[in-house]
Image: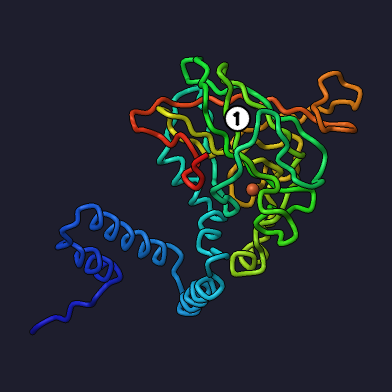
């Protein structure tokens, strides 16, 4: 008498994993097999129901429908689930003392104008003036001359220039070069917290799970220098709301900076500032790299 062998959930997972055994691209095989294994492990662990599977498919479908060349809901999923930060951390292990990286975010636009030392990035009033200054050094303490800081931020209307059809194209962004002693300075405005786009599937997830869409106030920076690893980072306002619950998990304690209140009659008041202002000291430490590096914004040559 023959016995019938029943197919178990483990048999199904094993068959899918084995289906990639013949993949000749070694890395692709590793990715495909681990993805199948962990996807199946997820469904098995939670006992995924048919209805929940359908809801998941609907979520992915809605994500595809809302995504276009201006709105990237898939990256928003990656950000809001901390995957973007995890991938960055895995790719960029840093030596002690080096400036930590964080998410690039969706509002970076290559080709910001090159501006003079100390120049303002706001092309129209956008909030309280903030003098951001510091020195770029190598991890060994040597100053890095000619490093490029590519900076962008939002104004007190919460918007980045790319989100604001009324703002000049180069509003609240610019590139600066360090001087021979590695120092740099620019006149920013105090940034304000803002929400990630929350009118799509990710926003629905935040509501359903009791999370919020807010990011703490920050200024973005990419620092490039010949012979050094490029780093994309933030200057977080250490007094901002939401530092302990950033919607995209981008806060690192080493990136918090104090916005120091300064009076209108302060002798160090920068040119072009009328009333009270803030100063923000922000030193940056780069890691030498054998790779050529990017000496300048690839979107603009001068
Ligand atoms: Fe941002």
Compared with residue 188, is residue 58 higher up or lower down, i.e. above or below?
below
Residue that badge 1 annotates:
254
Compared with residue 162, is residue 69 higher up or lower down, i.e. above or below?
below
* Front-most of residues 216 and 178: 178
Label 1 CB less than 8 angstroms from ligand 1 = no
Give the structural element (helix, strand or loop) at label 1: helix
The single residue placed furthest to the bottom in the displayed view is 1
The single residue placed furthest to the left in the displayed view is 1
| Place of residue 152 in the rendered image (x, y in percent of width and height, measured from the top left) | 64, 44
Label 1, residues with CA under 10 Å away: few <14, some 14-19, many ≥20: few
Q: Is residue 202 left or right of residue 164?
A: left
| Place of residue 99 in the rendered image (x, y in percent of width and height, measured from the top left) | 53, 29
| Place of residue 246 in the rendered image (x, y in percent of width and height, measured from the top left) | 65, 47
Q: Residue at x 77, y 39 (%)?
A: 190
Numbered label tally = 1
The image's colouring method is rainbow
Q: Is residue 251 visible?
A: no
Q: Is residue 52 left or right of residue 166?
A: left
Q: Is residue 140 left or right of residue 278?
A: left
Quarter where residue 23 is shown? bottom left
* Front-most of residues 132 and 273: 273
Q: Quadrant of the N terminus?
A: bottom left
Compared with residue 294, is residue 86 higher up or lower down, i.e. above or below?
below
Q: Residue at x 50, y 36 (%)?
A: 231
| Place of residue 63 in the rendered image (x, y in percent of width and height, measured from the top left) | 53, 71
Q: Is residue 164 visible?
A: yes
Q: Residue at x 48, y 79 (%)?
A: 54
Q: Residue at x 75, y 60 (%)?
A: 166
The single residue placed furthest to the front in the displayed view is 302
């Amino acid at each position: 008498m023959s016995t019938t062998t029943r197919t178990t959930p483990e048999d199904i997972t094993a068959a899918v994993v084995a289906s990639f055994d013949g993949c000749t691209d070694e890395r692709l095989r590793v990715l495909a097999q681990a993805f199948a294994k962990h996807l199946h492990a997820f469904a098995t662990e939670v006992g995924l129901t048919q209805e929940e599977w359908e809801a998941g498919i609907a979520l992915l479908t809605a994500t595809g429908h809302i995504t276009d060349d201006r709105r990237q809901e898939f990256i928003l999923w990656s950000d809001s689930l901390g995957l973007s930060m995890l991938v960055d951390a895995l790719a960029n292990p840093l030596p002690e003392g080096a400036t930590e990286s964080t998410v690039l975010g969706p509002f970076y636009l290559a080709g910001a104008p090159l501006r003079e030392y100390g120049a303002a990035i706001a092309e129209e009033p956008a909030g309280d003036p903030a003098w951001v200054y510091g020195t770029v050094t190598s991890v060994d303490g040597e100053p890095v001359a000619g490093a490029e800081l590519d900076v962008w931020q939002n104004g007190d209307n919460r918007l980045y220039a790319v989100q604001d059809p009324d703002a000049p194209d180069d509003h609240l962004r610019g590139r600066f070069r360090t001087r021979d002693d590695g120092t740099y300075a620019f006149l920013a405005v105090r940034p304000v917290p803002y929400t990630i786009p929350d009118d799509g599937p990710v926003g629905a997830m935040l509501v359903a799970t009791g999370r919020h869409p807010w990011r703490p106030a920050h200024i973005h920076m990419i620092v490039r220098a010949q012979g050094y690893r490029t780093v994309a980072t933030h200057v977080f306002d250490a007094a901002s709301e939401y530092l302990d619950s950033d919607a995209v998990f981008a806060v690192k304690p080493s990136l918090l900076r104090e916005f120091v209140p300064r009076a209108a009659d302060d002798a160090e008041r920068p040119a072009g500032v009328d009333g009270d202002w803030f100063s923000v000291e922000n030193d940056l430490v780069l890691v030498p790299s054998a790779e050529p590096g990017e000496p300048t914004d690839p979107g603009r040559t001068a």
